[in-house]
Image (tube, rainbow, N blue to C red):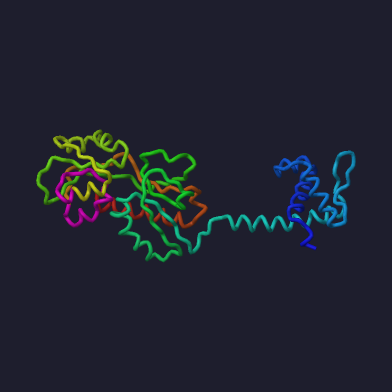
Amino acid sequence: MIERISLNSLKFFYFVAKYGSVTLAAKKLFVTQSAVSKQIYNLEEALNSALFDRKNKTLVMTEQGEILLNCCHQVFGQLDECLIQLSQPKTHNKQLVLSCEPTLSMKWLIPRLSKFKKLGHDFEVVLLTAGGVVDFEKDNIDIAIRRNDFDWGEHIYSEKIADEYIAMIQATTSSDTKDVLISTSRPNFFKSISRIAELKQSLKGYAKVELEHFYLCLEGCLAGLGATVISIYMIEKELEWNLLQKKSPVVQDGSAYYLLSHRAFEEDPRKIIFLEWLKAEMNESQHKLL
């Protein structure tokens, strides 16, 4: 019997029965009234039963129609639950794709990911390096770490990880050069740090040299090409190994790191787990470096 019945005709019947009107059903289904009427006619022909009585331009369901509607309620209800389940993101045994800007990834995050892996969670964090605006759907990204130095849009969910702390630093073995290497990867970075009293004082007498990324500024600094102003999270090991020395106090620049998502964090327990871990790790870095 099922091979003779169109699922589309059952859907049309269900909507007509639900709204009691061919006109309303057609509007909800985004089709013409004649298309709905034709599907109902074909269904009645296939079943050899009248599903509606037409009285004074109104539709009244027959006994057979009531039986079919009850069946449709059960079948379409189960089908709807199944489709919702299939459309929801799977949260178990799946990769959690994270986007993070290159220098923070290389100098702070990657050295810690092995610690996260040892915690034994049932998902793997896959890292992509990028900065700026995030296209979650196009790039198949689940979450992203970004500083709030640009507007990522109200449609993006965000949770604060930690405040940013920066300092002016120089290689411990460097000659007393008066160049300061400044990254151009953050909008108005030099202008903003020049307004901070402690850094403004330290920058006096230095000539600005621009490089494209913070890791270039850091490598140039380690090579003795000049001082630089950089996030303390990016120089943790270099300070520990006494490769760098601070030329200014460590200060907040008014920005912070956030974890971004295109869906609510509560919808995916993995995101909550990773967010709390990031907060704890950055808090530990702060206690070590401040």
Q: Position of residue 135 (x, y in %)?
A: 45, 46
* Residue displayed at 18% across by 48% down: 221
Res. 150 image quadrant: top left
**Residue at far right of view:** 55
Give the magenta range.
221-243
Q: Position of residue 94 (x, y in %)?
A: 48, 61
Number of marks drawn: 0
Question: In the picture provided, is 66 more to the left or to the right than 199?
Answer: right
**Residue at far left of view:** 175
* Residue displayed at 30% across by 55% down: 106
**Eyeballing the image, is 82 above or below 184?**
below
* Residue displayed at 15% across by 37% down: 206
Question: In the picture provided, is 18 more to the left or to the right than 197?
Answer: right
Quadrant where the image shows the N terminus = bottom right
* Residue displayed at 45% across by 60% down: 95
Seen from the viewer's position, the closer of residues 139 and 173 is 139
Examine the structure image and report whether residue 14 is included in the region drawn in magenta: no
Q: Position of residue 196 (x, y in %)?
A: 24, 35
Seen from the viewer's position, the closer of residues 32 and 107 is 32
Examine the structure image and report whether residue 242 is included in the region drawn in magenta: yes
Question: In the picture provided, is 230 more to the left or to the right than 46?
Answer: left
Q: Position of residue 152 (x, y in %)?
A: 43, 41
